[in-house]
Amino acid sequence: MPGLIRLKQSGGLAPLETNNGVAQSLIYRDSNARVTWEGVETYKRCIYRNWVPGEEYTEVLTFKNLSGKNITFTYEVPKTQYFRTVYPRRLTLSQGVTFSLPIQFSPLEKIPYVDELVVYINQTARRIALAGLLPQYRLSVEPKEINFGYCAVQDVQTRSFKLRNTGDLETSIEWSFNEPFIIEPRECVIPVGGMQTFTCSFQPQWALIYVGTATCIYGNDSVCELNLHGTGKFPHIVVQSADDGCDENTGNILVRFGDMPMNGSLKRDLILINQSAFRVPFRIESLPGVAKFDTAFRFSKTEGVVEAGKQQVIAVKFQPKACEQIYKDYFNVTTQHGNLTAAVVECSGKAIENVVEINLQKLNFGQVLTNNKSSRVIEIWNQKGATPARFQIDTSSDSPFQFSTQNGILPGDGTKQTIVVTFAPVHPMGYYKVVPILIEYQSPILLELVGTCHSDTGKPPVLNERYVSNFKRHIARHLALYPFEMYSDYLQRGKLTLDEYGSLVEVSDSPISNDSKAIKDEREYLVLPLSNPLKDNYSYWFSNEDNTRFEYVTLSEPYFIFDHCLLDTQNEWQQSLTVTNITRGKLTLVWLSTDSVNFSISPTEAEILPLKSTAFRIIFRPTVVDTFYTKRFEGYVSYKNQRDFTLVPDYGIALPVQLDINCIGDTLRTNHEIVPSYQFDRDIIIFPPIGEQASIYQTLTLTNNGTTPLIYRFLSTVDEFVSQFTFKPSNGCIKQGDYAIIIVRYKPSRFNSNTDIQQERITVRLNEREKFDKILHVFATQDKARLFIPNNGNIHALTTCVGLSSETHIQLKSLTRSPLEFSWTLDKNIPLIRIEPSNGSFQPYEEKDFLVTYSPTEEGKISMAAKLSCWIGDRSKQGAEAYHVTIHASTREGFLRPSEAHHDIGPVALGTSTTYDLYFTNGGDCLLRYRLYVKQTVSNNSKSNDEDEESIIEFLSDRDGQGEIDGKAKVCVPCRIHPFSRSNYQLDFYYDLLNDNNQSLSEHSHHLCTLTVHGVYPHLAFIDILGSQQAATLSKGLLSQAFNLTKINALLAKEPTAEELTYAINSHSEHMNDVCTKSKSKNEPSPVPSDDQPEAIVFNFNAAPIGSPSSEVHLLLENCSDLDTTWAFLFPKDLQIELEYWSRTGEFSEEELNDMKLQDNKIFNITPRKGFLKKGENATVTISYKHIFAGQHTLPAIFKVGRSRKIMLNLVGISVEPEEVYIQFYSTLHHLLPVELGAQGAPVQQYELYNGGTVPIHFQVDMSQLEQISVANYGFWVLDCLTPEGIIAPNKSFITQWVFNPLEAREYTFNIKIDLENCDPARITFVGHGFDKRNIPLDIAKSLATHLETTKQLNLNERLASLTADRMNFGNLPLFTKQRHITFLKNQSNRDAISFIWHVTNPEQVRHIRIQPVRGKIQPRQSMPIKVTFMAIEAPAFHDIDLVCEIYNETTLEQYNQEVKKWEAGIQQRWEHLEIDDEEYERCLRSGVIDENEKAPPPRSRSLQGSTLEMCQTLPPVIVNYELEETNLDRARRQRALMKKQMNMRPQMPAPELLHLAFTARTLVYNEYVDLCSDTSQLEKFFIDTCLGGDYQNANLKKRSKLIDENDASDVASDDRLLVKNEEADLLRTTLSDLLRNLLCDRVFADTLPEMIAESVPFFAQLQFTSPSKTDNEQRPASGSSKDEINVVEGEQSLVWSSVDQEQIPMLSKTPHSIVSQPKRLLSTSSSSLSDLEQKQTSATSPHISYNPNVRSLTEDILENTLWNILQEAYHSEFSLTSRPRLIALPPKRQSPVVPRVHLQQMDSNQPNFTAPPPTLPPPLIMTEAFD
C-alpha cells in the first residue's frame, strides 16, 4: 500500500515513546488524507508529530501510477529550510511504478512549522502540505447528541456514550452539566488513543421540555460539548381489576375476594395499562405501619416497568390467616422513583370459619334407674359448599354421657352425621354437663346434657328445663352459693321473693348482701345457654382459666403429671388433690371412676362441709415400662339436701357441677424414647390486631401420624404469668392416627402504645423429650382505636327552622386495621340534638357517615359537647378512646320565594301534556320541609262548578308536591299539566311549611305563584272557498252550501273524542266504508250517519256534461288555534292494509269496485293531500272532479287533524249526458233565517236553484201548499213565494224569493213541492224560527250574527287580478239609506295590462247595487279603487248579492283582434270572388262559417242574451275514435277537411277570468233598526233618503182576491203620483241618458255655460206654473193599475246602464209640481239677473225647496262625488292628504303617468277597446268573505 514510509536517521532518532510504551505514528492517518491525482495515488499532507527541537526526522512520500499509461512527474523543493528533499528531476512513471521521495524535517525550536511541496503530474501542479505540529489535546464524542425522548416525571432514563482521546497527550476531563441531566463518572483521565464510556441519566422533575449542553473540560481548558434533549411527561398508568371494580366515592380500585376459608387461597388479577408514550416503572407498596406478616394479600410482583402502550398483569393472592376476620388493606401503585400515586388498590376479603351445626343443643334424658341406659340422637353436619371440617368432642371415658363418635371429618356437601348419646348413670343423683364440640377453624359448639338417676335408696329431684333456667338465674343473681334452707329463711324474712318464673330474686329494700352470713361474690359468671357467637363459646372454653365458670368447689390442681416413673424403684406414685367448698351448704362429691389399674382416686365419694376443704389422693400404678398413661377423672358435686326430692322445694333445686381432672404419666427409662410422628396444620400463628384487654382466638390442629400415642405439652419461653398466649388443652395424649384440636388465645396484658409486634416462641414438648421439641412462632399486634374527625371536632349543624329537623352528615374514618366499636354520649339536658347511629362498628379503614339531627323548639343558638368512645373488640369497653366533639346549631325562620310570580304556559293541546318546571328559592338559611298544593280555577267552561273539573296538574316527584329545600337553595319541582277541556285554567300554588311529622307549622297557607294554562286542541277551519275552470261561474255562497262549510266548520269546532286525541293521523277503512254505504242514496246526496258514527260531510261538485273541464274548488284551510298541527285527507286506498296472498278471496264488493274505479281513474283529486300548519297559517287545498263518466259518483274520504277531529267526507260529483235535464239540489233542507214576531215588514229571503243540465228547465212552486199553510194559520200568509215560477238556464242558478212572517215564537216546518219540467217534482223542507225580541234565544242570535260575518280571502297567485276584499258586509241598515264601501282591483301581472267589466248575476239585484267604475283598464302591477254603493230600498230583506268581474288580458285581446281582422279580411277577399246576396253574407259572418256544407246555427233566443257571461259554451260530446279503422287515404282526407274547417272558423275570443264580489246586508224598518241598535250614535251615520222608494209594503203584497185588487186600484187612482209604464220609463231613461251624455261631451255647450250665467232672464222664466186640476188626474184611465204600470222602473239587467247617475229615475212617483216647476226654480235661483218680482217669488217658495227630498238627495250625491274625486286624486298621488297646509298654493302636479286624467274622466262613458263577447250563461252565486 503506498503512503508514508518512516526512515530511521543515522542520528539514531527513534519514534517517540509514550508513557504506556505504545509507539505513536508521526503522521495522523485518516481516510481523507489519501488522494489520487490523474491516476497517481499519494497523500495530500505530511505532518510531523512528537518531535524534539534539534533532531532530524525523515518521512518518505510515495507516488504510485495506477493509470494505464505513462505519466510525467516532477516537483519543487520546499520553500523553508526546515523541510528538505532531494534535488528535483523529471521522471516518467510507467504503469504500476512507485516513486519514493524522502522529506527531511529539522526543527530548531518548539514552534509549529508549515510548508508545502509542489508536484507536477502531466504538467499539472499539485500541492502537498508539510507541517511540523506540536503535541495537542484532542477528544471526539460518539455520538455528539443524545435525545432521551419522553420520560416519566421523576423517572430515570439512562444512555451511554463514548469519549475517545484522539490527541497527542494524555488528558484529564471534567464534565459540567445542569439538572435533570447527570453524567457519570464526572471526572476521569483518558490516555492517548484511549476510550472511556460514560452514562448519562435523565430524571425530569416536571412535565417540561429540557434542552441542555454538557461541557467536557480537558487539556489546556479545552472544551468539548455534548447536546442533550429530553421531555418530561407525567405518566399515565391505568389500574384495573379483573372485574372492573371501582369505588365511586374515593376512586379506589377494588379487588374483592369475598369469603375464603382458612385453608384455602384465591387469586385475582390486577392489570396495569401504560397509556403513555414511554416506559413507566412502578412500585406497589402497602400503607405504612402495617406489618408484612399481618397482611393476607400478596402480589406476584411489587415493582417493575411497564413498557409504552403495553399492559402488565399482576396476580394478587389472598390467603387468610385468622378465621372470621375481615381483611381490608390498601396498596399504593406509584412510580418507582417519583412516588407519583397512579391509583390506590383496595383489597378486601373475609376469612370465614367452618359452618358446622347440630340439630339439638340441649338433651334431657329425664329419669333413669341405676345401671340402666337411655339414648338420644343428635345430627351434626357441615354447610353445603364449605370445605371439609374436623371436629372433636371433649369428653371422658368415665362420663355417664357416652358418645358413639368422638371425632371425625365432616364433608362440605351437607351430609349429616348421626351421633348417639347414651346416658348410663351409676349413682342416684342429678347430672348436668356441658360438652364442648371443638371444630377446626370454628368456635366450639356447646351441648347441654341433663339427666337424673334414681335408685331404691336415693330419689333426687328430676331435673327439667324449668329447674335449669331457674338455677341459671340464681347464678346470675349470686344466689347459687346458698342452700335452700337459707332461701326459706330469707323468704320468711322478706329478703327474697319469687319472680314470675318461680326463681328467687332479692328485695331491693333489704338485700342479702347486708347480712353478715352472706357470701360476697363479686365475680362475673358465664351463664348458659349462650347464643353461640364466636367469643361466647371461646370464653366458656377458657372460663376455668379466667375463673368465670360457676363452681361449688375449687381444685388445688386440675392437671397431674407423673413423669419419669421408673418401675425399677417403686410401683406406685401418689399426688394430693384438695377440694374446697366455697358455698354455705354441705356438699357431696362423687368421682365417677371406673375400675382402672393405672390411675385411681381415693376416696371416690365424700361430703364437704361449708367453707371447708377435703383432700383426695390420686394414685398412679404403671405396669409396663417405656409406656405413656393418661386418665381423666370426672366428678359431680351437689348439695347434700338434693338427695331426695321430697326434701327440696321447687325454688331450692340446684344443679350439680361437673369436675374434671387430667392425669398423665410415663415410665420412660433413661435414654429411652418414643419418636413422635406428628403434623401441625401451621407453624406460624398470626393474630390480627386487637385492642387493649381484648381476647382473640385461633385453632391449632395437631395430628398424630405415628403408630404410638403422642404426648404433647405446651411450654412458653417466657414466664407463665407474663405470657399473653394461652393454649387449651395445654397438654394431652393423642392416640395413634388421631388428632387434637387446640384453642389458642391471645390476651394482651397491657397496651403497647408503639403497637410493636408481640411475638413468642412456643415450645411444644413431645413425648416428654426435649429433643423432640417443636417451636411454634406466634405473632400478634395491638392496635389503638384511632379515628379521624374533621374540623378538629367542631360540627356545625345546618341552620334549622322551628318545628323542623335538620340533618347534617359528617364523615368519620377509622385509622385502624381492626374492627372498632363506638358509642356516642350526648348531654341529656339538651334533647334537641341526636346522632345516629349512636353505636355500632367500624370496619378496617372504613369511612362511616353519621347523621346529626337537630330539632329546635325555639329560635337561638346552642353549642353542645358530645363524647365519642371507640374501642377495639366486640363487647368490652376496656381501653376505649374518647374523642370530644362540639356541636354548634342555630335556628332561623324560613320562607319560599318563587322565581316568577306569574307565568303563562300558553296553549296546551287536549290529549297531550306539557311539563313545567316550578322553580322557587328558599329565602332563609335553614332547611325547609314544604308541601305544595294547587287551587284550580276554570273559566270558559260549560261546567258550572269548578269542583267537577278534574285537576289538570300533577307533580312528577314521588312525594306528590312534598319535599325539602336547603337554605338559599333553588329547587325545581317538575309538573305535568294535561288539560281535559277547552278552557282557561288558573293554577294558584300554595305551600305549607311542615314539621318532621308532615304536619303544617301554621294554620294559614302561603301563596307561592300563579300559572295560567289554556286548554286547546288543534282547530282548523275552512274560511274561504273559490271555484275555477268548470266551477268558476259558481258564487261563493253556492259553493259554501255545496261543500257544507258551515257544517264542517261546526264539526271541526267541537271538542275531539278520546280516540281522536290519541292518534295524530288514524282511522279505519271499514268504518269509512260503512259510513259511505249509508250515505249512498240517489235521492239524498247529503246523508246523516248514525249516532255512533261521526257525521259524514258531503262535498257536492256542480253537475256538468261529460267532457267538460274539471270542476276545481279551492278551499282556504286556516289553523285557528294556538298550536301547530298536521292535517291529511285520506282515501280508502290510503287506509287499506296490504293482505297476504293466501287471504285474498279474489272477489270485491260493489262498493270496493266503485272506489277502485274512482281512485284508479283519479276522478277525485285533492292537492295537497296532507300538510303542516303553524299557528295562524293557512293553506290552499284544491279538490277537483273530472267529468268523464256519466252518473253520480261518491268517494268516501277522511279529513283528519292531528290529535284532533276526524271528519268523514263523501266526495260527490255528477256528470250528465248531453241534452239531459238535471236540477241539482245541494240540500233538500233549507233553513230560513229567524224572523221577529210583529215586525212591520217581514224580510225577503232567498232560495237558490241550480240547473246542472244542458237545457233550460221551467219550474213552478206549488202555491196550493202555501194557501193550505195560510188557511192553517187563520188566513195569515206565514210563508209566501214572490217568484212562484221561472226558467232556469243551463249551468245557471235561479234565486227564488220567499217571505217568512211567523205568528208564534216557535219552529216552523214547511214541505214545499216544486214541479219541474220533464222531471220528477222536488220536495224541499223549509225550516224557520219565529222569536220574540224581548227574549231572543242564544242560537237564534248567533245565527243572525253569523249570517253577516266576514272572513279572510283566498287569493290564487296564478290569477291576473285580485280584489283586496271580495266580500263586503254592510250589516244592518235602515230602509231608504245608502251604504258605501271601497275595494281595490289589482293587476297581478308584471307585463300585461288588463281590462275589466262588472256584471250582476241576478237581474233583480240591479236596483240595490251601484258600482263605479263599471269598466276600465289597469296597467301591470297597478291597482284601481272600486266604489260600491248599496241602496236599502223596497221591502226589508236579507240581501246576498254576487257580482262578477270579467278580467281580460289586453295582450291576448289585441292578438285576438288582429286574428279577427285577419280572418275578416280573408273572408272579404273570398267573398269578392263570389256572387252571393247580402243576406247570406251577413248570416255567414254571424255564424263564423263560410263552407257551403256548414249551416249557420239557429239564432239564440233573446232571453239568453242578457249578459256577456253567456259566451261560455259546453264542449262537444265525446265521439267514437275511428282513427284505428280508417285507411291512409281516408285519414289524409279527414285531416285536410279538418284543416280547412279550422281555417274557415272564426277565431275564438279568449275566455275571461272571473272574480266574484259578494255583498251581504240586512235592511230593516227604521223603528226596528232603532230597537235593534244598541248605540244611538250609529243613527247619525245614516241619511234617510225618502226619494229612494215609496211604500215598501206594496212591493211584497199580492192581490190575493178581487176585493184586494179593487181596493188597490182605488188607492192608486186616488194617489197624486205619476204612474209610468215600462216602455215609457225605458224611453225616458234612454232619452235623458243620451241627452245628458251628449251635453257633457259637447265642448261648445261647456264653453257657453259661463255666458249663460251672465245672460239676461229668458222669457219663459216669467211664466208661472199652473198645476193640473184634480179632475184631470181622476180622468186617467184605470189601466194605470195594470201589471205593465209599476211604481219602480224595471230596466235592463246590466250595470252598464246603472253606471249613469240615474238615482232619481226609479222614483218617478212624484207630484207634477215637483217634476216641472222644480227645475225651473233651480235654474231661476242660479241666475244673477233676476227681477225683484222673480226674487220674491223664489223667496216665497224657498222653504219648500230646502225641505224637498230630491234636493237633499242631490246634495248628498254632490258631496259623495266630491269626496270620491278627492280620494281618487289622492290615490293617484296628485296631492297628499297628510301634508301640512300651505299659505301659498303650489303649482299643480303633472298628471299621473300610469293612469291619465282624461282616462279617469271618461271611464264611465268610454267603452273598452275589444269586441263584445258573445252572450254566455251568467255564473251562479258565490258566497265569499270581505272586510271593510
Image (cartoon, rainbow, N blue to C red):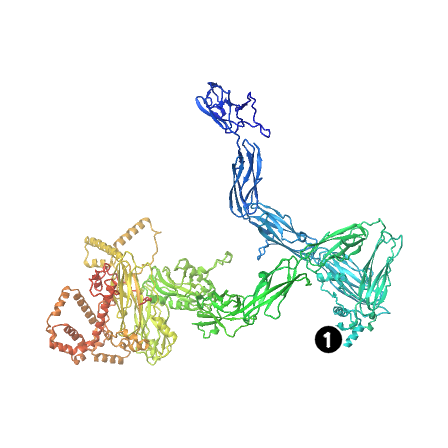
Residue 1178 place in picture, x, y as percent: 38, 62
Task: Locate residue 270, reporting x and y percent.
Answer: 61, 50
In the rendered structure, the answer to whether residue 1318 lies left or right of residue 1651 reads: right
Residue 1316 falls in image quadrant: bottom left
Q: Is mark 1 on a helix, strand or loop?
A: loop
Q: Quadrant of the N terminus?
A: top right
Judging depth in this view, the residue of 938 and 399 nearest the camera is 399
Q: Mark 1 points at which residue?
A: 509
Residue 1371 visible? The answer is: yes
Q: Nearer the viewer, residue 519 or 157?
A: 519
User: Is any atom of residue 1667 visible in this view?
Assistant: no
Horizontally, residue 601 falls left or right of residue 1123, namely right
Question: Which residue is at the front of the view, 1427 or 311?
Answer: 311
Q: Quadrant of the C terminus?
A: bottom left
- Of 247 and 1099, nearer the camera is 247
Counting from the top left corner in percent of width and height, residue 696 is at: 71, 58
Residue flagged by tag 1: what amino acid is it? Asp
Q: Residue at x 61, y 71 (%)?
A: 829
In this rendering, the answer to whether 994 lies above or below 1607 is above
Locate residue 407: give its quadrant: bottom right
Q: From the viewer's perspective, is residue 454 above or below residue 1551?
A: below
